[in-house]
Amino acid sequence: MVNVDKKSSQKYDVIVVGGGFSGLYMLHKLRKEGLSAVVFEGGDNVGGTWFWNRYPGARCDVPSMQYSYQFDEQLQQDWEWPERYSSQPDILKYINHVADRFDLRRDIQLQTWVESATYNEEEKQWHVKTSKGEAFARFCVMATGCLSSTNTPDVPGIKEYAGQVFHTGNWPKSEVDFTGKTVGILGTGSSAIQSIPLIAEQAEHLYVFQRTPNFSVPAANGPTNRQEASKIKARYSEFRKECANKFTGYDMHLNEKSAAEVSSNERVEEYEKRWANGGLMFLGAFSDLLINEDANETAAEFIRQKISSIVENPKVASLLMPDHKVGCKRLCADSGYYSTFNRDNVTLIDISKNPISSFQSMGLTTSNGEWTFDNLVLATGFDAMTGAISKIHVTGKQGNSLREKWIKNPKAYLGLGISGFPNLFTINGPGSPSVLTNMLPSIEQHVNWITDCINWTKLKGFDSIEATLEAEETWAEHVNEVAGQTIFPTCNSWYLGANIPGKKRTFLPYLGFPPYVEKCESVARNNYTGFEFS
Ligand code: N01
């Protein structure tokens, strides 16, 4: 581990902010290139998202054999994933193994929050102030995660609530025991859908406050199929290449047929097959589910019927049925979510028409009732893709603030570089495929690209590299244009920043991993078009 006092005002080639999947690989890669680097991480251990999201049932919904690093062949051969979809503790164990295996900890400073990063135009370097000191570097890489800045709703009186409050995205390390407790949970996104079945098993009574219902499909998790895993390992690098050619960067088993071209029997058969197999591959059932509203409606109706067949109380079933398009809010994968509403100790409260008016010390009031509970769980999501960076006072050229820039319009060229902020890179920043892909290959692609770019800049004798405003704007327009051809912008989601009051509504992630990679490679091949150097 970095000795805080000794290194607190040292100068590096690169400062990396964040010690999750991105920060760890970034450090490893920079070191391999002979560059000096430090990682500042706020948590008391590595892991990022997987360090903080310890809520009951936290699990990844991308298959374990794909949700893992591919940069080291021996690592991917050696590691054994116990389950098809990995639990948070197993992923954290893996991240810790990687930190030890590649001797990363000596350059990671834990429990160190980055407060500000200021670009010195004369010296062409970043001055980073942390909770423990300061450091300088020519380059700064924000590896701060897309879903790491928690969103706590600003409901009147929420601070008056006297029971214990837990946010799924910032769950305590010590065990939380809801036995004998009444619990209220706010939110019904992925985190809630994973945790509700487990909290319901423990709590005396669980009140679920739902503003918008969400589509969920069974995860069908289970132990890793060893035969299948061995087959993948026998040709891991080829398998990874095949996945990189998929739209989402992982294998969705996309059916080439459109929903319209098959009979209704064939359609239902396909949906049934995918429902039974489990997971997000449900969205690969037909080629046009995400681009054609009618096709999408066939999938939506199939899931609604499933809800109706699982949930015994028809009124509750009907409340759980979303009326938006499947996938426009991220599809969830669950283990017994809908059937949990058949339990006597679970009550669903619709707050779409009767919103929460205020919290009191013992609970909350909606326009049609009062609810008391011992503990409150906020499963209210994140200020996605820009929130974590905006929390840091980032100041670029001419004293301009990144927070101010992003309030008006959160954009970055290729999700990698920001005009007015030279030598600053974002891993999975706004405009990158990131959250619409398997995050791991997306992270590795960004880290590799950033490292090559830093090397190239140094090789050419430049002191700084900066995205041009024109390139940044053209890219942001393109991101929205591509999304506009799909069902994604048809509902309020965090992809659009719509979950954060006051955040500009713009589509944040880029749709399509292979064309994105091709674009990044072409930019690099052509001497980093869209960037300027000094
Ligand atoms: O957050 P969310 P999440 N009053 O934003 C509600 C990833 N992830 O933590 O829809 C009342 O999806 C909000 O309601 P509404 C995954 O990418 C992955 O669950 O805005 N309600 C919504 O129901 C996921 O998409 C995995 O009307 C309020 C909920 O809170 C992303 O993280 C697991 C409210 C927030 O849902 C975020 O998921 C978990 C208010 N003021 C997470 N404010 C896996 O890999 C918000 N809500 C499986």
Image (spheres, rainbow, N blue to C red):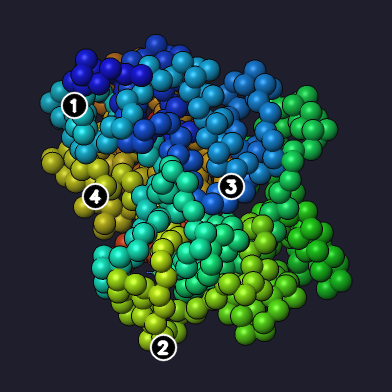
Label at residue 403:
4
Query: Which amino acid is tagged 3?
Result: Arg
Label at residue 429:
none
Which of marks 2 and 4 precedes in the sequence? 2
Of all residues shown, which one is farthest toward the bottom? 368
Nearer the observer: mark 4 or 2; the answer is 2
Foreground of the two, 110 or 204? 204
Q: Which residue is mark 1?
A: 134
Nearer the observer: mark 1 or 4; the answer is 1
Q: Find out whether the residues at labels 1 and 3 contact each other: C-beta distance under 8 Å.
A: no
Q: Find out whether the residues at labels 4 and 2 contact each other: C-beta distance under 8 Å.
A: no
Query: Which amino acid is tagged 2?
Result: Asn
From the viewer's perspective, is 461 left or right of 175?
left
Label at residue 59:
3
Q: Which residue is mark 2?
A: 368
Nearer the observer: mark 2 or 1; the answer is 2
Of all residues shown, which one is farthest toward the top? 34
Secondary element type, mark 1: strand
Query: Which amino acid is tagged 4?
Result: Arg
- Which corner quadrant holds the C terminus? top left
Q: Residues within 10 Å of mark 1 (few under 14, many from 20)?
A: some
Secondary element type, mark 3: loop
Give the percent coordinates (x, y) of residue 218: 70, 59
Q: Place residue 14 in its image quadrant.
A: top left
In this view of the protein, can residue 513 be seen by the observer?
A: no
The residues bearing labels 2 and 3 have C-alpha atoms spaced at a distance of 35 Å
Q: Place residue 324 in its image quadrant.
A: bottom right
The residues bearing labels 2 and 1 have C-alpha atoms spaced at a distance of 53 Å
The residues bearing labels 1 and 4 have C-alpha atoms spaced at a distance of 21 Å
Give the percent coordinates (x, y) of residue 273: 82, 59
State whether residue 408 is above or below residue 386.
below
